[in-house]
Image: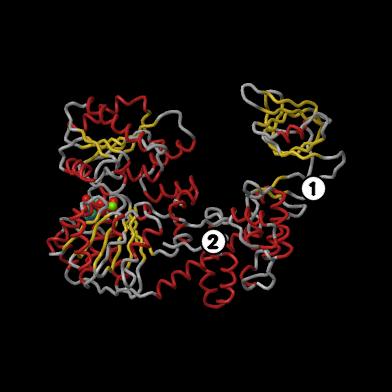
Amino acid sequence: MSRAADFTSLPKPAQANLRKLGIIDAQGLLLHLPLRYVDETHITLVRDVRQGDQVQIEGEIVHSEVQYRPRKVLIARLQDDSGQLTLRFLHFYPSQIAQLKVGRRLRVFGEVRGGFFGWEMVHPQVRAVREGTPVTETLTPVYPTTAGLSQASLRKYIDWALDNAALEETLPAAVYTDLPGYAESLRALHRPPPDADLYALQERSTPAWQRLAYEELLAQQLSMRRHYAKRRSLGAPALAPSKMLIPALLASLPFALTGAQGRALTEISRDLAQRYPMQRLLQGDVGSGKTIVAALAALQAIEQGWQAAIMAPTEILAEQHLHKMQSWLQPLGLEVAWLSGSQNKKARTLALEAIASGAAKLVVGTHALFQEQVQFARLGLAIVDEQHRFGVQQRLLLRQKGQPEPHQLMMSATPIPRTLSMSYYADLDVSVIDELPPGRTPIVTRLVADARRDEVLQRVRDACLQGNQAYWVCPLIEESEVLQLKTAEETYALLQASFPELHVGLVHGRMKPAEKQAVMAAFSRNELQLLVATTVIEVGVDVPNASLMVIEHAERMGLSQLHQLRGRVGRGAARSSCILLYQQPLSEMARQRLKVIYESSDGFEIAQADLNLRGPGEYMGVRQSGVPMLKIADLTRDEPLLHRARQLAEDLLRDHPAAVEAHLQRWLGHAAELVKV
Ligand code: ADP
Ligand code: MG
């Protein structure tokens, strides 16, 4: 950049406020784009307004009062040549009371609604004017802002940046033949011309928006590719394909791998043989059989003299993995170690020793795996189950246990929709298990209003008396873990009382691991017919004889959570059902979620619907993963641009390295930062 507008020349308090918005320099100001626009270019008469219109009205205050009942509210009446409009403020300052005094001439802007007193506006924008003051000629941008920074000041600083910051192109002109230039686009968005189309601007479908969305997507692609290239330059143990251990385990299994499992294993095995670290996601719907594939991958590392680790997000799940791994690996003469936060000191010391000496070939555990004291002799492969449950940082800590960098296999039943895998997750290689093991019968899902609970109880009794097992999932109470626990205990007591002829168990997150384990083991052995559980059983739990699940307050749960929970049944040959109990009335969002889960059992479809309903930020759990989001581009709307950016990124990296640097410099830290997986 040739000319740099000096951000530090702005007033200090303004700089501090701008930082709160993530703006740290002039480019940041330029790329802080309007959230929406308001049309103050003409004045509407009260008699011409329609319900829901966003309009500007000018008139004189003819009445103003503060009412105190039922709550404090400031009400004023504005009169123009054609009628009256009520202005209503539920929160207000003394200065606003003064501004709305009788006799004042005002321009107000807002949405009109038909109210008790005729048309009204709630919390309109208000500006004092003299009669005959000309209206603004262009649409007014409205920016995301923060307390202490007014729209007017923000506009002023952005104007300053537009006039002073470097606006030159970063990439060769040939890249954007059909789109306007960078400077032109920024001006069009910050200072829309008089003939601008409000609707197209709001929809972000104008060429100027497209141009910037494209730039942003391109920056994301470039940074992902650079990251990819960097990973390939790191060294990792090249693990030759297994000749003994994998064939031996395969021969001992009571089943053959499905075609999809076989393909995934081939892809993983090929990656492991490379001299740079694998970073592969093994994605397969609940029950598709990811665990055995992970075990086989571990064997490839072990056969070459390296260790493998499997980390799971909950004790229940980790413990279940431990049992499976032991049953598979111990007959091959391989030691499996166990690490969890709750094990006693002696067991832990022994495990740590076996891990450090290399005697333990496979280590299974929870978050305890990446703690400081854990030293591996030679970690060659790190496997993370239910990867979305871990943060970027946690996965990184586990990886750092290997020297050189170990290979990484992540597993998840929550699929990554296509647009996300091409953007945020472009650095990941993905293997998909898109086939369930044979002999599974589809799960029947029913939506039942809570009022019909008695029928559901009857269903549970019948199923259990016929030799089946059932889960009863207690409601999720996000606000309070204590309340959640209380509800679970009450439900347990109630169900025990309702079913004196059945053995009922309870498992929840606050139980001691040993207690949890005892309950799960009893349920696995069919000593308990009904298991009352909180959502702790959401991930991974595998009891094939369980064929009925009741989920209470299903309307409170997220889509992927419901899908995961439901996946706990339908694992054996018996016909399984999942009953979703819901409480009326349903919010629109809850209604849509339940509709999706009722209509689909396909993890991909459900994930796509979830993404559409919640948007990528919520979907990926930004708070947890720390992934910076695209600010301008919208993956659904801009998918064609995403494809274009993907194609272009490679050419640019090859032919225009300097331009790539300049482009990343401009965009990184503003919008499309690298995602580290
Ligand atoms: P998930 O992919 O949800 O982690 P699991 O690995 O727990 O699924 O597998 C679910 C169940 O299917 C387990 O009981 C597992 O032993 C069994 N399984 C896995 N692969 C096959 C197969 N190819 N044929 C039959 N059963 C299988
Ligand atoms: Mg699993």
Q: Which residue sits furthest bottom?
A: 655
Q: Quadrant of residue 165?
A: bottom right
Q: Quadrant of residue 511?
A: top left
Q: Is residue 492 left or right of residue 335?
A: right
- Residue 666 coordinates in the image, percent (x, y): 60, 66
- The quadrant of the rendering that contains the C terminus is bottom left
At label 2, counting other C-alpha atoms closer than 10 Å, the crowd grade (few under 14, some 14-19, many 20 or more) is many
Q: Is residue 64 left or right of residue 290?
A: right
Q: Amino acid at mark 1?
A: Thr
Q: Check disc 2 and report the residue beneath it.
A: 672
On the question of residue 47 being in view, the answer is no
Q: Is residue 229 left or right of residue 41?
A: left
In the image, 151 versus 637, the foreground residue is 151
In the image, 193 versus 163, the foreground residue is 163
- Residue 177 coordinates in the image, percent (x, y): 65, 68
On the question of residue 525 being in view, the answer is yes
Mark closest to the chain's N terminus, 2 or 1: 1
Is ligand 2 within 8 Å of the beta carbon of the residue shown at mark 2?
Answer: no
Q: Is residue 334 left or right of residue 146?
A: left
- Residue 527 coordinates in the image, percent (x, y): 15, 38
Q: Check disc 1 and report the residue beneath it.
A: 136
Q: Amino acid at mark 2?
A: Ala
Q: Secondary structure at mark 2?
A: loop
Identify the residue at image location x=87%, y=41%: 132
Instruction: Tell me the distance, in whole angstroms, between the alpha carbons under discs 2 and 1.
Output: 34 Å
Q: Which residue sits furthest right?
A: 132
Q: Secondary structure at mark 1?
A: loop
